[in-house]
């Protein structure tokens, strides 16, 4: 079914000014402060809601051209997509004009972790869950030191926050970090459009002086394919990491008594990935994306970790070369971008995905055991990224016939095994090459946000390093 056309703002449901209902509504003063539970005049009790924090962007009124103060915010922002569709919305967070690639995320929560995930650099993230902002923001859920995405697109912005860990509202958080957000837009219709047409370049703007045609031209001229986004998110110099998962959040039974030195390449690494590795007994040295392989091997690590990251793996040949120089010498574990770089280093190819996998609810099957995990995936970040072309045994070829990616049976050397597939489209989600002492996953096993089903992957990496010591 074709995606529905973009529409203007929804028709007003307000009663006409001439109706008695409207007159009564004008005469009622609505208190702006928190509501409480208290006695009524008839001796009963009324029940209200006490909001922890009010979101100013939602509750603030608007003065329009006729000089009348409206108690609600009117549309003051536009999302213009490269296909020519224009979506009116209301703004929150920063103001201005920003361009990026629009992708949708199916997670029900975890918006703060998504905001601070470097894998979203250069992208507008549309949340398919309609209600966002109700838990506010807190400093403990940061996945990096700043926000990397270009903007946030949501259906409904919560008018209040209700969580004991909340320290500020989502709008306050975005304003401090100069990140644009829009709400009161038909996210379902946009998602259907992205599923039909694939990820689209878009422009967010609160600048009323710019015409739709000007914004459309910006969208058509902006490119993300072939751009090195990793260099903009990686660390500047090596550093040591020692923080574990806090005891109140730790879900793994038993702690490792052995210690392993792991060098982690930062292609856009998340804090909780480092915490999970440390909780499994790893002493971690984090190095920049362009750190020479020879310097890493001189540290004599027990293993090397290639992290997640944004963009097209074909745009970072220096990273592929680094991976090539390391695999086979020490045990290696790669996720997301690291998974794709390992595939290219082995001689495989990567292909763009139509709209990628973004969310905390993707089913993945481990072909070795038949176990199905619900995983957090950020796949196909950037149009040039995507599924690895893999060599599969004949019995698995049937699985790949009905998806949108080409498979080159000769692209990887003999011995490389596909260990995991995504059950939504049967795309490759994991590789293993025992001869070269490596394993990789297309998704984020630490799942922050998301379920913890795949945390066992860190244990596999530990076992691989243990066996290499023997």
Image: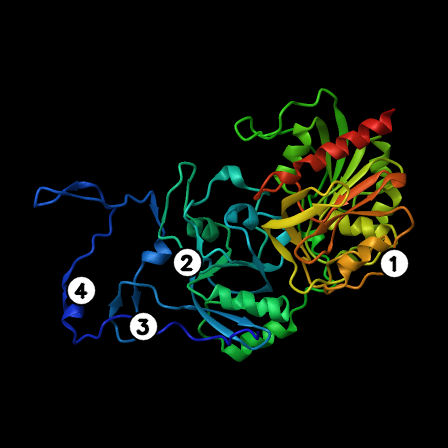
SS of the residue under disc 1:
loop
Q: Quadrant of residue 29?
A: bottom left
Task: Report which residue position mark 2 lands on.
Answer: 156
Distance from disc 1 to disc 3, alpha carbons, whole Å, reads: 57 Å
Residue 409's disc is 1
SS of the residue under disc 4:
helix
Label 1 crowd (10 A; few <14 / some 14-19 / many >=20): some
SS of the residue under disc 2:
strand
Earlier-in-chain disc, 3 versus 4: 3
Residue 12's disc is 3
Q: Which residue appears at 74% of the width and 40% of the height?
A: 369
| Display coloring | rainbow
Earlier-in-chain disc, 1 versus 2: 2
Earlier-in-chain disc, 2 versus 3: 3
Left/right of residue 24 with respect to residue 2 in the rendered view: left
Task: Report which residue position mark 4 lands on.
Answer: 25
Pair 1/4: label in front:
1
The quarter in which the N terminus is drawn is bottom right
Q: Which residue appears at 56% of the width and 29% of the height?
A: 246
Q: Are marks 1 and 2 in contact (CB under 8 Å)?
A: no
Q: Quadrant of residue 9?
A: bottom left
Q: Which x, y percent locates residue 408?
A: 85, 61
Q: Which x, y percent locates residue 406?
A: 79, 64
Left/right of residue 256 with respect to residue 120 in the rendered view: right
Pair 1/2: label in front:
1
- Position above or below: 269 against 24: above
Distance from disc 3 to disc 4, alpha carbons, whole Å, reads: 16 Å
């Amino acid at each position: 079914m074709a995606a529905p056309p973009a529409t203007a703002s929804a028709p007003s449901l307000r009663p006409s000014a001439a109706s008695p209902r409207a007159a009564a509504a004008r005469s009622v003063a609505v208190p702006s402060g928190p509501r409480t539970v208290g006695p009524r005049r008839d001796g009963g009790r009324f029940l209200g809601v006490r909001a922890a924090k009010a979101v100013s962007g939602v509750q603030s009124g608007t003065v329009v051209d006729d000089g009348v103060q409206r108690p609600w915010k009117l549309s003051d922002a536009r999302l213009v997509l490269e296909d020519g569709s224009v979506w009116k919305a209301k703004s929150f967070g920063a103001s201005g004009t920003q361009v990026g690639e629009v992708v949708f995320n199916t997670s029900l929560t975890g918006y703060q972790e998504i905001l601070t995930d470097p894998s979203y650099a250069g992208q507008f993230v549309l949340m398919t869950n309609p209600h966002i902002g109700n838990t506010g923001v807190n400093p403990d859920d940061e996945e990096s030191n700043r926000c990397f995405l270009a903007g946030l697109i949501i259906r409904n912005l919560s008018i209040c926050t209700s969580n004991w860990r909340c320290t500020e509202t989502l709008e306050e958080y975005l304003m401090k970090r100069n990140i644009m957000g829009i709400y009161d837009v038909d996210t379902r219709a946009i998602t259907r459009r992205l599923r039909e047409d694939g990820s689209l370049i878009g422009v967010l703007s609160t600048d009323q002086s710019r015409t739709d045609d000007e914004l459309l031209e910006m969208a058509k001229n902006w490119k993300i394919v072939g751009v090195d986004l990793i260099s903009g998110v990686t660390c500047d110099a090596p550093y040591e990491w020692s923080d574990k998962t806090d005891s109140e959040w730790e879900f793994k039974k038993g702690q490792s008594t052995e210690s392993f030195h792991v060098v982690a390449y930062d292609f856009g690494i998340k804090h909780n990935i480092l915490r999970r590795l440390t909780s499994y007994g790893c002493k971690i040295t984090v190095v920049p994306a362009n750190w020479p392989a020879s310097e890493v091997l001189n540290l004599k690590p027990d293993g090397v970790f290639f992290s997640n990251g944004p963009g097209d793996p074909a745009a970072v040949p220096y990273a592929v070369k680094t991976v090539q120089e390391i695999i086979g010498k020490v045990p290696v574990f790669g996720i997301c971008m690291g998974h794709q770089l390992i595939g290219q280093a082995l001689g495989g190819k990567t292909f763009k995905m139509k709209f990628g996998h973004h969310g905390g609810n993707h089913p993945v099957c481990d072909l070795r055991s038949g176990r199905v995990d619900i995983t957090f995936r950020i796949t196909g970040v950037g149009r040039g990224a995507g599924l690895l072309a893999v060599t599969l045994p004949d019995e698995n070829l049937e699985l790949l016939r009905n998806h949108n990616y080409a498979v080159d049976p000769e692209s990887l050397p003999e011995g490389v095994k596909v260990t995991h597939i995504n059950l939504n489209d049967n795309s490759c989600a994991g590789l293993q090459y025992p001869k070269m002492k490596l394993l990789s996953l297309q998704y984020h096993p630490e799942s922050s946000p998301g379920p913890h089903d795949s945390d066992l992957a860190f244990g596999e990496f530990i076992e691989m390093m243990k066996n290499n010591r023997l």
